[in-house]
């Protein structure tokens, strides 16, 4: 049977891919950050997931504001990095697992979750930055397959946190009912606090992020119903991307071990945050 071996929460700041791809992640600005992400790469090397589900949001790269989709699933055997204005990233093509995607789609349907299906999907920094953070640079190929699960957080109203959390639970049930013997990791991406525009541009709230993350680890039910208004007020308009971490958390056991946490302020405009969670029963 398939199983979920752990969950990662990570910001997906696009500056990271630009600097990484240009070999410019050097100097004092990046020193602490480069050190801080090493345990994530070590964890992936040790755990060797067969498939990594990345819960992310598209930032108008594959989709536009003509159609806004609350939840969607990639069902393909490969995904290309989107051209976000600089050409496609020169990273290997992301290989998919369309059989597992089909299983997820069927399970979501069974659980009455309406999740769009994308049979062709270009993935932007929301997806490819977490992949690079987790698996490193200069790869000839990625060490695992990927499944993109996108959440419409760029247009209000966003899906509610509780719904994101419950979708995570449905993912867990689906994985645990998949007959192949494979290990699956799940990443929730985006956040934590940042606001990119308007009078509050540059807002960062480490205290709130730390409180929220503490609760994500030990009592996710206590934060799943936080309103969008509160999240935006406390963590900025783009800080609300954090709801995607609730999907990752919902896919894990009730109790988890946080084996690593790292925060670094700022990377670009964001409180870069990383957590690695393992299921307690494991
Ligand atoms: C930044 C962060 C994001 O999550 C994003 O999607 C775009 C920009 C930033 O901090 O610059
Ligand atoms: Fe983002």
Image (tube, rainbow, N blue to C red):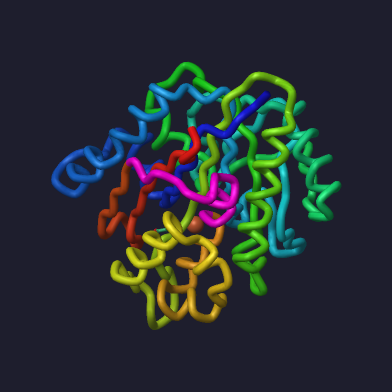
Q: How many marks?
A: 0
Residue range of the region highlighted in magenta in the rendering: 245-259
| Residue 63 locus on image (x, y percent) | 69, 53
Residue reaching furthest front? 281
Task: Place residue 207 in its image quadrant.
Answer: bottom left
| Residue 230 locus on image (x, y percent) | 49, 79
Report ligand 1 position as a quadrant: bottom left
Asked whether residue 85 is in view, the answer is: no
Q: For the N terminus, which image quadrant?
A: top right
Q: Nearer the viewer, residue 206 or 150?
A: 206
Q: Residue at x 19, y 45 (%)?
A: 32
| Residue 97 locus on image (x, y percent) | 69, 26
106 vs 5, left or right, is: right
Q: Residue at x 33, y 27 (%)?
A: 42
Q: Residue at x 45, y 80 (%)?
A: 233
Asked whether residue 224 is in view, the answer is: yes
206 vs 101, left or right, is: left
């Amino acid at each position: 049977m398939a199983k979920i071996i752990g969950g990662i929460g990570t910001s997906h700041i696009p500056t990271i891919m630009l600097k990484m791809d240009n070999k410019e992640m050097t100097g004092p600005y990046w020193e602490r950050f480069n050190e801080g992400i090493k345990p994530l790469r070590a964890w992936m090397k040790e755990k060797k997931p067969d498939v990594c589900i990345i819960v992310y949001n598209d930032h108008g790269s594959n989709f536009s504001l003509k159609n806004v989709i609350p939840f969607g699933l990639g069902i393909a055997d490969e995904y290309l990095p989107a051209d976000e204005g600089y050409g496609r990233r020169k990273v290997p093509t992301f290989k998919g697992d369309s059989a597992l995607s089909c299983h997820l789609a069927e399970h979501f349907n069974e659980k009455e979750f309406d999740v769009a299906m994308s049979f062709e999907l270009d993935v932007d920094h929301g997806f490819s930055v977490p992949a690079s953070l987790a698996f490193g640079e200069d790869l000839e190929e990625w060490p695992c397959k990927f499944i993109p699960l996108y959440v419409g957080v760029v247009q209000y109203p966003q899906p509610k946190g509780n719904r994101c959390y419950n979708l995570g639970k449905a993912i867990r049930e689906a994985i645990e009912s998949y007959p192949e013997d494979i290990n699956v990791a799940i990443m929730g991406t985006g956040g934590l606090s940042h606001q990119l525009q308007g009078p509050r541009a540059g807002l960062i709230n480490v205290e709130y992020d730390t409180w929220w993350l503490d609760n994500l680890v030990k009592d996710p039910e206590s934060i799943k119903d936080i309103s969008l208004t509160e999240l935006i007020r406390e963590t900025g308009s783009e800080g609300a991307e954090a709801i995607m971490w609730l999907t990752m958390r919902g896919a894990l056991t009730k109790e988890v071990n946080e084996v690593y946490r790292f925060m670094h302020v700022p990377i670009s405009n964001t409180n870069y945050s990383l957590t690695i969670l393992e299921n307690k029963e494991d």
